[in-house]
Amino acid sequence: MIPFFFSMILAYLLGSISPSYLLGKLLKGIDLREHGSGNVGATNAFRILGKGAGIAVLLFDIGKGFFAIQGLGGFFEAHFTLPMDLLLYRILIGLSVIAGHNWTLFLKFKGGRV
């Protein structure tokens, strides 16, 4: 049970990584929370940082969810005897990464939107 709980924490932390905030700081030296809509989501990154950075943010955000569900979800696949248990586990992993994306630990629990 502890490895499953640990993987949900990892999924939350993975979701907490904010590529738009990092790209804003690296590319233009700005905090996206202070520009545009004030949100650190892909839409605000498109508006403020441009098309290339916006696409990069969007792909990274999609990748976070994909990696969490496929990577962490698949890591424990052999531990499940019933397919429904694996499905439930992957749903919980998905919810954890979404929670990290929306309420990121690294930005005082204010992140992107789904």
Image (cartoon, rainbow, N blue to C red):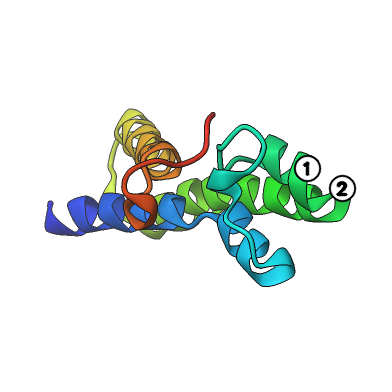
* Crowd tier of the residue under label 2, counting other residues whose Cα lies within 10 Å: few below 14, some 14–19, many 20 or above: few
Question: Vertically, is 74 above or below 92?
Answer: below
* Crowd tier of the residue under label 1, counting other residues whose Cα lies within 10 Å: few below 14, some 14–19, many 20 or above: some
Task: Describe residue 35's horizontal placement relative to residue 48 as left or right.
Answer: left
Please identify the residue farthest to the left as the structure is shown: 1
Cα separation between marks 2 and 1: 5 Å
Residue 77 visible to an observer of this rendering: no
Question: Vertically, is 24 above or below 35?
Answer: below
Residue at 43%, 57% in the rendered image: 14
Residue at 32%, 52% in the rendered image: 105
Task: Describe residue 51's horizontal placement relative to residue 80 as left or right.
Answer: right
Per the image, the residue denoted by label 2 is 51
* Res 28 label: none
Question: Vertically, is 61 above or below 38?
Answer: below
Per the image, the residue denoted by label 1 is 46
Residue at 30%, 34% in the rendered image: 82
Residue at 86%, 54% in the rendered image: 52
Where is residue 16 drawn, in percent x and y?
42, 52
Q: Secondary structure at mark 2?
A: helix
Residue 107 visible to an observer of this rendering: yes
Which residue type carries mark 2? Lys
